[in-house]
Amino acid sequence: MRAKGIAYDTGFVRHGEISPEKFDLDAVRRDLTVIRDDLHCNAVHLVGGDPERLEQAAEIAAGLGLEIWFSPYPLELTPAEILDLFADCARRAEQVRLTGAEVVFVTGVELSIMNSGFLPGDDVMQRLSRLLGQPQRMQEAGARLNEFLAEAVALVRDHFGGRLTYACIPFENPDWDLFDIRSFELIRSAEVADVYAESIRNLVAQGKPVAITGFTTAAWRGSGAVAPRSMEIVEHDEAGVPVRVKDGYVRDEAEQATYLREVLETFEAEGVDAAFVYLFALNSYTHRPDDPSRDLDMASPGIVKVFEDLSWEPKAAFGAVAEVYARI
């Protein structure tokens, strides 16, 4: 595997509000140094909705010699708003690339379900619910997305001279002729475990470099079987803030570690070009070891556990990723 990476959250913007609110560049530098030196990553997928934060993190990553996947992540934006975001980010990514860094621009992630204008529905859950059992609706969404991506890619290439990709959900079926790298959000679960390696083998056989992004599970017993839904054990308040873990779930860091080790070894065996574990830390899912009902980190895909004061410690998954990346 050429690019051994992990996703790093610079702050997601939804309805004008950003989380996390604080963005400490010294902490970012420490984290990215750990990602390079302790996790043995040579690439980082910088995700978020604030162009300035993305650029600041990219400048730090470039100074550390990491390959940068510069990934604006729009949430609940219109297509016109997404284009404005991409244009701003493309200019910033190009400035980082011109310093000599290897930069790949990610022209969106799961756009059709995370934003308006591609599928009916006011939010991601409504859009997903209306897709179930509706293959025609999937095709229609894919057609709208491809029209948008053609415009977006032309706009980005006006400002950015490096390689481009798009991180898709497989049903979106993007026009890969537009891109240099084919990126897929592919999460192994019990339903697809028996065909998972074969599906990746088939993607790799089609020629262009393949990247796998978004693969993850959480740190509770049984999470690997339902990995795409492993965060659903958390209850939220009326404002959508996570507040407690539902009853009946047991913390199990080994489950997450074993899962990530197995899928990374699958990627290496099947010839994947780049892999990005999702993700380094999820600051809003606090680890409370003395209060299991409020130990939100059980449901976090992060490979470090974050405390109330935003300090963190490695989970077992951290060691698993580091071991695989050091070996392959």
Image (spheres, helix red, strand yellow):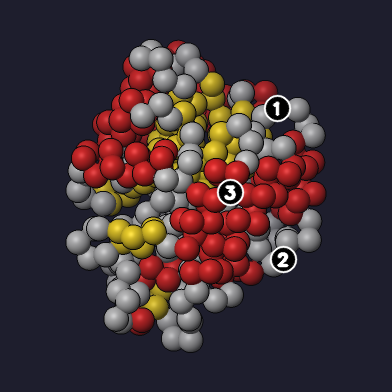
Determine if residue 143 is in view: no
The one nearer the camera, 213 or 139, is: 213
- Amino acid residing under circle 2: Glu
Please give the residue where the numbered disc 1 appears in the rendered image.
208
Image location of residue 225, percent across then percent down: 64, 69
Give the spatial CA distance, label 1 vs label 3. Answer: 24 Å
Image location of residue 104, percent across then percent down: 49, 26
Q: Earlier in the sequence, mark 1 or mark 2?
A: 2
Name which quarter of the figure residue 61 lies in: top left
The answer to whether the residues at label 1 and label 2 have Cβ atoms under 8 Å apart is no
Asked which secondary structure carries label 1, the reply is loop
The answer to whether the residues at label 1 and label 3 have Cβ atoms under 8 Å apart is no
- Amino acid residing under circle 1: Lys
Mark 1 crowd level (few <14, some 14–19, many ≥20, 10 Å Cα): some
Q: Is residue 326 left or right of residue 202?
A: left
Relative vertical location of residue 59 with respect to residue 263 in this rendering, above or below = above
Residue at figure coordinates x 38%, y 68% from the top left: 297
Mark 3 crowd level (few <14, some 14–19, many ≥20, 10 Å Cα): some
Relative vertical location of residue 194 with respect to residue 213 in this rendering, above or below = below
On the rendered image, what quadrant is the N terminus found in? top right
Please give the residue where the numbered disc 3 appears in the rendered image.
324
Asked which secondary structure carries label 3, the reply is helix
Residue at figure coordinates x 36%, y 29% from the top left: 64
- Amino acid residing under circle 3: Val
Name which quarter of the figure residue 258 lies in: bottom right
| Labelled disc at residue 284 | none
Asked which secondary structure carries label 2, the reply is loop
Mark 2 crowd level (few <14, some 14–19, many ≥20, 10 Å Cα): few
